[in-house]
Image (tube, rainbow, N blue to C red):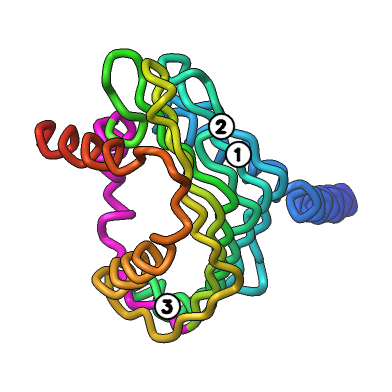
Amino acid sequence: MKWLFKWCVRLVLLLVVAIIALLLFKDAVMKAVVEQRIRARTGMDVKIGRFSVGIFSPVVTLEKLKLYNRPEFGGTPFIDMPELHVEYERAALRRRKLHITLMRFSLAELTVVKNEAGQTNLVSLMAQPGAKEPRHHARDLEFAGIDVLNLSLGKVRFLDLKDPRQNGALDLGVKNQVFRNVNSEGDVFGVLLMIWVRSGERVSPVPTEGVLYRLSDQKRHQR
């Protein structure tokens, strides 16, 4: 019996050490997993400064995410996201509903690139199998709204690798703007449309409208 007691004590100590190690290194492990999945789904290189998932609190925080275009689009930075902070309702998640109580979304820069073959990185990304066919458990989640959305949006750049004269930029100029009760995907679209309209007068004096037209036209033909 003495040896059995010692074995049980050692097993308990081993489990405690394993749990402590998991708590200490879980964020680093999760960050590596998220980076690997983004690379697999998009074909783009990605770097994440910090990724944190709360164990005892329903909070997910991602900081300093940088996503880079594929070589055919010059390998330039695609997305520069300083922060994505999400607080959600656990009870709703158990019912397969995504109810976000607070979201802080900060996007410093988004770069739309048209390569020499006339393709754009956004349309190419949407054509990826991972973008069209999300995993089953993600499809099952029902969006149940965002109570408070704190939004910061910087610049949208347009690069034409074949004709640099078409290059341009749009400064959205949104800093910590708060929206409440964003309850549907239509509400999200409405928020983005309102920001786009308000930022119209900050467009740089280059022919970016042609870039936007060709982007939407190309997407329409690929449907």
Residue 96 visible in the snapshot: no
Q: Nearer the viewer, mark 3 or mark 2?
A: 2
Q: Element under label 2?
A: strand
Is residue 69 located in the magenta-colored stretch of the structure? no
Is residue 125 located in the magenta-colored stretch of the structure? yes
Disc 3 to disc 1, how far (Cα)? Answer: 25 Å
- Residue to which mark 3 is pinned: 146
Tell me the tag on residue 77: 2
- Front residue of 124 and 88: 124
Q: N-terminal of the two: label 3 or label 1?
A: 1
- Front residue of 170 and 80: 170
Tell me the amino acid under the disc marked 3: Ile
Q: Residue at x 29, y 66 (%)?
A: 189
- Front residue of 143 and 69: 69
Q: Residue at x 35, y 38 (%)?
A: 207
- Residue 103: image location, x then y, percent: 53, 71
Disc 3 to disc 2, how far (Cα)? Answer: 29 Å
Say which quadrant the C terminus sits in.
top left
Tell me the tag on residue 66: 1
Q: Read off the magenta span.
A: 124-147
Q: Nearer the viewer, mark 1 or mark 2?
A: 2
